[in-house]
Amino acid sequence: MAQLTLDEVTKTFQDDDGEIIAVDEVSVDIEDGEFLCVVGPSGCGKSTTLRMIAGLEDITRGEIRLDGQIINDQPPARRNVAMVFQSYALYPHMTVRENMAFGLEESTDMPDDEINERVEKACKDMGIFELIDRKPGELSGGQQQRVALGRAIVRDPEVFLMDEPLANLDAKLKAEMRTELQELQQDLDVTTVYVTHDQTEAMTMSDRIAILNDGVLQQCATPLECYHEPNNLFVAGFIGEPSMNFFPTTLEGSTLKGEWFEYELSDETVAAVEGTSDITLGIRPEDIEFVQSDVGPNVFDSTVHVVEPRGNENTAHLQFDESMDEQFIATVGGMKQLKAGQHVKIRFPENAIHLFDTSSGSAIRNRTLDEIETVESVV
Amino acid sequence: MSIRDGGFIDELRSTENSRIGLYALLLAGIAFYLFPVETAVMTMFKTESAFARTLPFAPPGTDGFTLDALTTAWNTLRPGLVNSLLMAIPATIVSALLGSMTAYGLTTISWRGQVGVVVLIIAGIFIPYQAVLVPLAQFWFQVLPGLLNGFVNTVFGFITGGNWQYPSRNGYVQLLQLSITHAAYGIPICTLLFRSYYQSISDEMIEAARLDGASAFSIYRNIILPLSLPMFAVTLIYQFTQVYNDLLFALVLVNEPASQVATQRLAALTGGVVQSFNTTMAGAIVAALPTLLVYIMFGEQFAKGVAGE
């Protein structure tokens, strides 16, 4: 059981053009038993961060501490971490049993029968006991994935490190393994750092999400905080699918003047954004309301360009005007039908809009969460 | 329906035609490659006069059949065969093993300056044997004995009384020297073969092993070595053939008649004033037997290794 701390961890690579900063002063405290997802676009430094925790990459600056002990210079084997790789990295010439026992044989002086017992128990837990004497080549992708997880579990490490472990599975299996992995992590209660580029995985599995971009930590918060209260434009745009709509505007008095619309702000909001004139207005697709008539302020005319039905919801690509190059997206419930070419009135409710400083990207005002309801439990 | 049937039969016919063509080509290939071997085998069972009378590839008649040539060749080559195997088998195994370890150290483990070492090793492949003959002979017959004599007589002088002599005229010592020379000259090409194979091994797997707590040697012993068995078959066959077939180094390094290797004996067998084709052919066949056996034994692994499985 361990608390993992990254303290201004930095990684630079030398290139012909000079120094490349892959990870830039990332600081995160990962609590004992916490499931932290590290997400970001490819090349954002998330895998490098994970590899530094594992000890597979040197740390240029900063400290990594496990339970207060600095582990910067510990070799991988001494860090008591287990890693699951995207390619599973199983040893092809060894059976499942040998694959799982190898780590225990190499890193402990546990007697053979105890190793065997632990391997068999882990196999039973993972539901792969009947495959124990097969070689990886004879297993399906999902089964190999389980062996790779089992190999990590059997080590009983302080920290699990997972590098996109579900990336090679098909969609259905991925959803299944996601739930299973989450349950497993809760049962074992082992601190876990999980790297993924798939924000669905990050949103659904983790206790907290750390979002990286260009090696810089953008935000580290619970999935819902990241979704509803993003720190900046990058987080707002990265989390959520389809992503948030952004409109550049300038503040004039109490009005946000955009290219296509003018948005009237309440006094309260004007006070909150005081001092910034270039403001980006953001609104999530599901917060855009379709209205019948000009009810109140901030109702705009627009045209439906394309409709993508998804069954549970419809995604509408909208334009304010035919001459508008880019479209913005609104989602409505699956039972609400829309047609391409239709003229509609839409409203951006003020409690749902996010306002960002256009030049720095940081959030000035996030949406309010007054409307959150909880489902009361039935006694 | 009838059209479909016709199409099916046509298809079958064309498949069969292409199959017939394929087999015809393969048979022609086999005949082309086996023809000289068949000629050699036929010739070695013929008497000198039968050889003069019949076509080279025709079988000997009952009156022209003899085992004399084979017996002569076998008796001449036999000591050479033993010497060759004594020399070539250790040389092959040592160069394959060292090549594999070197390649592992140059691919899977990263350290400063390894590119320079790789370049030196690759350059080693292109050193012509002829260029090193004189220094090689000087090393084994002058430099090394000189050094060893000095060392042993200085350190163990109280036992040897300063009279110890490096046994450079001992046949087995000469064979050992030849074997070491071949092992050393085989390392560059073996390293190159293994290196390209190891570069295809997944980095993540090696990293997984490192996280599992395996040391560099344990990774080699438990992961790399078992995975490189097909490559070992390739290098063992290649290297054995190279070492076994070499005559140049043997001529320079082995001068004790009792220690001569098969190629030297074969040269002696065929090098007479009168050409007797039947003993020459018999000698060639007998000398080729070990390499033939090696190919048959490791053929399957060889194919796997070459195919890069």
Image (tube, coloured by chain):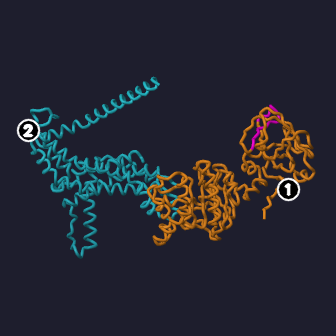
Chain colours: A orange, B cyan
Start and end of the magenta stretch? A313-325
> Looking at the rendered structure, which numbered label has been put on residue B62?
2
Reply above or below: A247 against A378.
above
- In the rendered image, which quarter contains the N terminus of chain A? bottom right
Residue B163 vs residue A327, the one in the foreground? A327
Residues A218 and B113: in front is A218
Whole-number angstrom distance, CA of label 2 to CA of label 1: 111 Å
Location of residue B132 with respect to A262 vertically, above or below: below
Q: Are marks 2 and 1 on the same chain?
A: no
Residue placed most toward the observer, A243 or B183: A243
Furthest residue toward bottom: B158
Q: Which numbered marker is on residue B283? A: none
SS at circle 2? loop
The residue pinned by badge 1 equals A370
Of helix, strand and loop, which one carries label 1?
A: loop
Residue closer to the observer: A222 or B240: A222
Q: What type is the residue that disc 2 sits on?
A: Thr
For the residues bearing labels 2 and 1, Cβ distance under 8 angstroms: no
Left or right: residue A256 versus residue B180 is right
Q: Is residue A260 left or right of residue A195?
A: right
Q: Residue at x 41, y 57 (%)?
A: B226
Provide the chain ID for the residue under circle 1: A
